[in-house]
Amino acid sequence: MSTRIAVVTGASSGIGAATARHLAEAGFEVVCAARRTDRVEALAAEIGGRAVACDVTDAAQVATLAEEVGPRLDVLVNNAGGAFGLAPVAESDPDDWRRMYDVNVLGVLNVTQALLPALVASGAGVIVNVGSTAGRLVYEGGAGYTAAKHGTKAVTQTLRLELFDQPVRVSEVAPGMVHTEEFSLVRFDGDQAKADAVYAGVPDPLVADDVADAITWIATRPPHVNIDELVIKPRAQAAQHKVHRV
Ligand code: NDP
């Protein structure tokens, strides 16, 4: 049997990097894609994969990614994404909202369109989109991000309908609070104190490996099994607003 190939976008940190490692351990050759070339190159060297510099919002770079992948692909993990800001609607910067829509929704669209033929050609493709609990509810200051992640969910569900007669499964992993190094730092534009406050006192937030484990489980089910969605939160987070802190 030929080596199974997986693509992970946003593989330069956090959930994406952990997922690339888990998939490699599960036997996949992983194509690690992100904007920070040095990081994806180091990761690819570590796990015996391939690195591609790719901004998922840039059609030309996504086309290069598709060329590098070639005619057959088994698993696509659309993980690249993120939040910018936590301003109320009345004060939000529309540019932040545009960037969030760009990466969390149009990024999924671009990469999926480019790689779908290869996923179909594998005869048993899997797409796992990394959404969020922010795609299931809303919270104050979060409208730009929750709107974008609701968008990720809508794309995922629509794609599953449209591909109903194709050999491609479509799943969404929707994590709650995951303590990754960069997510909140990016959200608060490098303000470490604000980023740390998100996780302050939470006994055990999820870590990237927890989500990577879930994604890898989805990607390795038998070809007739479609995990539609998997919501994963730390025990301390009973709901978005109900977080145990000590
Ligand atoms: P990180 O900030 O660590 O990871 C984000 C990744 O996305 C980075 O590797 C970044 O790489 C990449 N990325 C960002 N923009 C682009 C782009 N335009 N093109 C290509 N890659 C891009 O955060 P997490 O690992 O925590 O988040 C990963 C995913 O999980 C995101 O979709 C996020 O929304 C989602 N999520 C996170 C949660 C959390 O609490 N941490 C909870 C729920 C969902 P680079 O800058 O090198 O391009």
Image (spheres, rainbow, N blue to C red):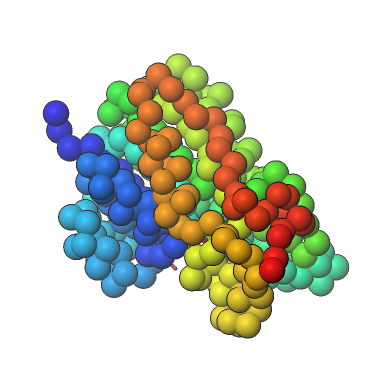
Judged left or right of residue 154, residue 6 is left
Residue 34 to residue 153: above or below: below
The number of callouts visible is 0
Residue 90, quarter of picture: bottom right
Rendered location of residue 193, percent (x, y)? 63, 82
Q: Residue at x 45, y 43 (%)?
A: 214
Q: Residue at x 50, y 35 (%)?
A: 171
State whether residue 80 appears in this view.
yes
Quadrant including the N terminus = top left
Rendered location of residue 110, percent (x, y)? 46, 47
Judged left or right of residue 110, residue 23 is left
Q: Residue at x 59, y 41 (%)?
A: 231
Rendered location of residue 142, percent (x, y)? 73, 61
Judged left or right of residue 222, residue 137 is right
Residue 69 to residue 177: above or below: above
Nearer-the-camera pick, 4 or 155: 4
Nearer-the-camera pick, 179 or 97: 179
Judged left or right of residue 71, residue 203 is right
Q: Residue at x 29, y 37 (%)?
A: 73
Residue 4, quarter of picture: top left
* Extreme residue toward the front, this view: 246
Residue 35 to residue 31: above or below: below
Residue 232, quarter of picture: top right
State whether residue 54 appears in this view.
no
Rendered location of residue 54, percent (x, y)? 36, 60
